[in-house]
Image (spheres, rainbow, N blue to C red):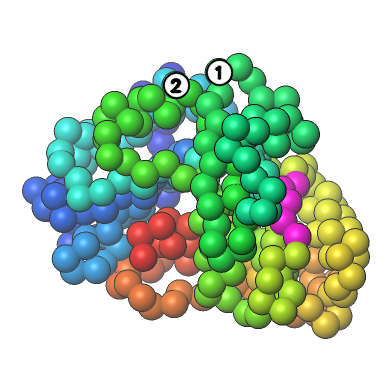
């Protein structure tokens, strides 16, 4: 069924050349229901490609991986050497543990407090120096094995780790930071330059979204009247969600391009917040 799946974003710059693949760094973001990847020409320091899929047909690791390989094959990249590959695991199975109490042998127990992790998942952890904690996360064992067989030196990380590190290092000293996906979003609250709160919320309606955002802010003692909220991910300024949140939040912002790498003209047509995570992975 994935053979007929079409991307909702497919942008390749004039600079793209499959024969230069050994100069390309790739960032892949994958979740059940979604897949996207971007290519950076490391020599020219230019983002040259962005391709994104979202579909209920991407229901398991086989569907995800077949879609990825077909997309690469269409551009002559499937069996080409790449300079590096970073795989961003995008799911809700993650938990932040303070460094002072983290014990690697208890990784599964940390996740068990919040989730029932299926047996076909593996557990990993990574230290987040910017937040002085460890992110423990689960990923499908099958997709992990497929990725590492194809790219043995690939780096596997969780999308929330990248989001947290980016917001802790690059953005305002205080504020609320929101990364939106199809039906869930990450929310990070930073005060005095330190991580105060992080969580993921599922939503079905704009009212759900606004409720979880405002509830998290209220529970952490911040107000929409004096605290900025900065958005990244799959959301536009002209949206029902932003319109509703704007009734309660005075200062709404969107992530801005830090201009640390160049972006192909073709990709400039895509809202920057859509590929913010890939950009950060390739900086």
Residue 136 found in image quarter: top right
The foreground one among 171 and 46 is 171
Categorize mark 2 by other alpha carbons within 10 Å: few (<14), some (14-19), many (20+): some
Residue 266 found in image quarter: bottom left
> Residue at the location (86% across, 73% down)?
222
- 274 up-or-down from 46: above or below: above
Q: Is residue 84 left or right of residue 275?
A: left
The disc placed on residue 30 is: none
> Residue at the location (84% across, 59% down)?
216
Q: Position of residue 79 (x, y in %)?
A: 17, 33
Q: Earlier in the sequence, mark 1 or mark 2?
A: 1
> Residue at the location (42% across, 29% down)?
144
Q: Position of residue 53 (x, y in %)?
A: 46, 40
Query: In the structure shown, which secondary structural element does the residue marked by tag 2 occupy?
Result: helix
Does 81 lie within the magenta span? Answer: no
Query: In the structure shown, which secondary structural element does the residue marked by tag 1 occupy?
Result: loop
Q: Which residues are magenta?
A: 197-201
The reply to whether dot 1 and dot 2 touch (C-beta < 8 Å) is: yes
> Residue at the location (67% across, 54% down)?
100
Which residue is under mark 2? 142
Does 199 lie within the magenta span? Answer: yes
């Amino acid at each position: 069924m994935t053979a007929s799946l079409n991307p909702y974003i497919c942008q390749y710059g004039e600079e793209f050349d499959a024969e230069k693949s050994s100069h390309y760094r790739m960032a892949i973001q994958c979740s059940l229901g979604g897949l996207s990847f971007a290519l950076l020409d490391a020599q020219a320091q230019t983002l040259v490609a962005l391709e994104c899929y979202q579909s209920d047909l991407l229901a398991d690791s086989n569907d995800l991986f077949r879609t990825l390989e077909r997309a690469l094959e269409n551009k002559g990249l499937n069996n080409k050497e790449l300079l590096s590959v970073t795989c961003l695991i995008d799911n809700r199975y993650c938990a932040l543990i303070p460094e002072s109490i983290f014990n690697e042998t208890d990784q599964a127990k940390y996740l068990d407090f919040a989730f029932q992790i299926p047996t076909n998942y593996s557990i990993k952890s990574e230290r987040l120096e910017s937040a002085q904690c460890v992110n423990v996360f689960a990923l499908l064992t099958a997709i992990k094995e497929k990725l590492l067989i194809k790219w043995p030196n690939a780096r596997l990380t969780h999308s929330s780790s990248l989001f947290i590190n980016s917001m802790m290092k690059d953005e305002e000293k205080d504020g609320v930071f929101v990364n939106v996906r199809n039906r869930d979003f990450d929310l990070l609250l930073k005060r005095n330059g330190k991580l105060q709160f992080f969580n993921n919320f599922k939503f079905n309606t704009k009212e759900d979204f606004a409720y979880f955002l405002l509830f998290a802010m209220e529970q952490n003692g911040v107000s929409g009247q004096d605290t900025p909220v900065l958005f990244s991910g799959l959301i536009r300024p002209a949206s029902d969600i932003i319109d509703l949140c704007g009734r309660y939040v005075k200062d709404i912002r969107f992530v801005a391009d830090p201009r640390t790498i160049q972006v192909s003209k073709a990709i400039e047509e895509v809202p920057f917040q859509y590929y913010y995570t890939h950009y950060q992975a390739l900086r």
